[in-house]
Amino acid sequence: MTQPTKLFSTLALLSLITISIISILYLYLNTHDKLDLLCLQGHQPDSIGDGVGYYVQIGKHVDDKWLRMNTALSKAYKVCEEATSNHTCDVVLPVKSGWNNLCQKTRMMFNHLCNIKQYQKYKYIVKVDDDTLVDPEVNVEIESLQGDVYFGSSQSRSHRFFAGQFYGFNTEVVDKMCACDRPTCASGEGEDVWVGRVLRVCKIQKREVFITPGLVYHRMYDTERMKISFATLRD
């Protein structure tokens, strides 16, 4: 091999090594930045979602297997009514099954949570219905919220409250709700309507935030390739 050929081969090898080192450094720094972003938002890669507490209201006809399959509901604090059976309930409230009693059930749930203060171990709490499918990725979005917030997946036409299948608050807002003299349910009042009224009556300052569409599915999972309906039987 002639001298120029050896020189050319050496330069080519050095160029290849330099490109490889730059590529490795780029991948490392890019990944490191992403991990730093998660840490800045209060996350660790293996503990995303630990700051969000779910409270699911369970009707008497809900299937246990569905709760185990639904990731968000499987670890939720289970709030049951007196007619519920075959469930591992965290609390059974003295309220009868049926749509007409949902407001009273939610009011009792808040009374219970305010008394035991169990929710304070979380940074955010979410109330979710038992016929709602929740993408675990929603926890990352929730934990990135700042300040006093009231969030949900869909809102009423009047924009006065988030719909009952999925809504939540940061813990400080719940503290203020607990400290307030919460009104009783009006005749025929929806539970989500009551929550919106409590926030107004208690004059709680907060931002209202919509959860990204496609992370919460109520009664139906509907995409371009799949359509699955699910709903609980109620009296």
Image (cartoon, helix red, strand yellow):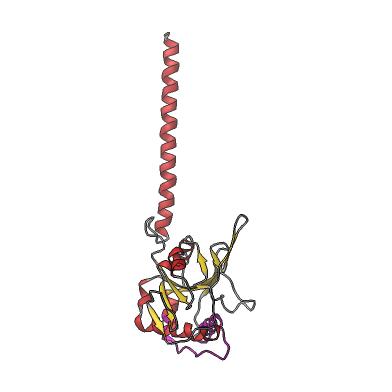
The x, y position of residue 142, in whole percent, is: 47, 66
The x, y position of residue 45, in whole percent, is: 39, 55
Q: Is residue 149 above or below residue 46?
A: below
Q: Is residue 23 above or below residue 197?
A: above
Q: Is residue 127 magenta?
A: no
Residue 221: quadrant of the picture:
bottom right
Q: Is residue 198 magenta?
A: yes
Residue shown at 42% from the left, 30% from the top = 18
Residue shown at 53% from the left, 82% from the top = 191
In the foreground, 108 or 194: 108
Is any atom of residue 143 visible in this view?
Answer: no
Please provide the residue range marked out in magenta. Answer: 175-201
The answer to whether 232 appears left or right of 87 in the picture is: right
**Which image quadrant: the C terminus?**
bottom right
Residue 224: quadrant of the picture:
bottom right
The x, y position of residue 153, in whole percent, is: 55, 69
The x, y position of residue 223, in whole percent, is: 60, 58
Residue at the far top: name it.
2
Residue at the far right: name it.
157
Residue shown at 47% from the left, 78% from the top = 60
